[in-house]
Amino acid sequence: MKLLTAIIKPFKLDDVRNALSELGIQGMTLTEVKGFGRQKGHTELYRGAEYVVDFLPKMKIEVAVDDDQLTSVVDAVSEAARTGKIGDGKIFVTELAEAIRIRTGETGGDAL
Amino acid sequence: MRTAAIVDKPMGGTHSEAVSRPPAGRSRAMALVHLLVVGALGLAPSWALAEEVLDSGDTAWMLTATALVLFMTVPGLALFYAGMVRSKNVLSVLMQCFAITALMSILWIFWGYSLAFEDGGGANAFIGGLSKMFLAGVTVDSLSGTIPETVFMTFQMTFAVITPALIVGAFAERMKFSTMLVFMGIWLTVVYAPVAHWVWGGGWLGDWGVLDFAGGTVVHINAGVAGLVAAIMLGKRKGYPGTAMPPNNLGYTIMGASILWVGWFGFNAGSELAADGVAGMAMAVTQIATAAAALGWMFSEWISHGKPSVLGIASGAVAGLVAITPASGSVGPMGAVAIGAAAGVGCFFAATTLKRAFGYDDSLDVFGIHAVGGVIGAILTGVFAAAALGGSGFGDGNESIIAQVVAQGVGVAATIIYSGVMSFVILKILDALMGLRVDEEQEVEGLDLALHDERGYIL
């Protein structure tokens, strides 16, 4: 199993969620986060006082998938979240040692 | 033109006890005739009193205008300021405005009204008397011109409330609440009341023919200069200007600015103290100048920084309201456009460039908007009051634009010097007695928790 952690632009959230649903992904975890990469931050200006805001709001989506689903899920998220402009975000893939459904005690792929 | 409740210099030697409102503009000649007749015939005061009848139309409008001006401070100004501070200080600013409203109201009836509007006898050029302390003699039947004196007194009270409250923006986020209250109480007594008396109460600036219809010098330059002095004496906020101090909620700020805009019709059109043509023109030019200034600031910012901003257009509107205040009884519509546009651009420069160049931390630009806008308005009032430029004429004794501008300059300079020096002295004494600033730990924690044990946002 793999854990996908995707950092995306907030306005792309609905597109990504729909794309994952179409693949039959049953659940995901969403967190509102802030951060920056190559996009850096933005500037704000109040009566001539300019502030550089380093951390921009982003959405972090975490999805656990079976190994055989990995490629299609990565592709779906990439396509749905892409605008082609700097700041589209990143996808991190990590090994997932175990998953347990709390209600039934199922483990592994059955718990996803 | 707003004036004393008492005619201090009746002509022909008759001392009239009548509370009357020296008239402005075209009615001035009529009043002169009236006074000459009274003087020549040596008629008794009772005759003059009989002339003063309550006008229900005027009274209805002034009751409304009074409520509108109070609405400018709470919640208008309070919200305007609260939106601009950081979230840890949002309540402190609301609290300061609210507490000032309450304290000034009480001090006004204790002695403020009497000092500003009563006859001061030998010292009348500079300060009024104490005969109406605790509103002695102000009854249900007392008249001030064509309105009840209670209404006149309360209308003036709302001005005495908003003027100190304006100063809050200069020392926001760092002043001790206790010292702030004491400062405001003393400031009302020794700065606001005398300056109001100079212009409206029969004092020496009125004798110069200074045109200040609704309080450009008395309210805005007065508060703006006191704010600058306070900002400098308290020192910069910790971290200013390196640390980001963005406004916590510009939605509050634009709501506040909008309330100020609406309330200002009471401030300016109400200053006629009657429901008449001058009040109507005052209302029109208030709207016109405000619109011109909002656009002036918006376009200045758009051109110089690339984007028009909400804080910018709201600030511009307030700058326009400030600038048209002294002019609202004596200029025409196109004069208002010019005054508003000048204020929008001028105050934009003052609040963005000038402040940065000098490095003082006038947190919410009380000086940059109220003093600078007030000066622009006061001086240009001298220009656009000219009948040739659509105005309704100069002040008593002034025959030309130059003479009127000189008179306006005298009013501006006197207010700047007096307010600056007195504010400095009061703050210096209070610094020694009580301390002006919260300590560093309280400032970092935020005044809401440090001084009031409350938080503005529990979300």
Image: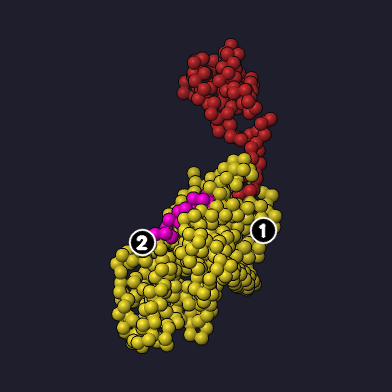
Magenta residues, dominant SS class: helix
Residue at image coords 49%, 54%: B334
The x and y percentages for residue B212 are 50, 67
Secondary structure, mark 2, is helix
Write down the quadrant of residue B305 in the picture: top right
Is there any visible trace of residue B127 in the rendered image? Answer: yes
At label 1, the amino acid type is: Tyr
- The answer to the question of whether label 1 and label 2 lie on touching residues, with beta carbons closer than 8 A, is no
Please say whether residue B53 is one of the residues in the magenta stretch.
no
Does residue B336 sit above or below B105 in this rendering?
A: above
| Residue B381 placement (x, y as % from top left) | 53, 63
Judging from the image, mark 1 belongs to the subunit labelled B
Between circles 1 and 2, the one closer to the viewer is 2
Q: Colour of chain B?
A: yellow
Residue range (magenta): B280-294
Q: Which residue is mark 1?
A: B360
* Coordinates of residue B264 in the picture (x, y in percent): 45, 58
Which sits in the foreground, A62 or B387? B387
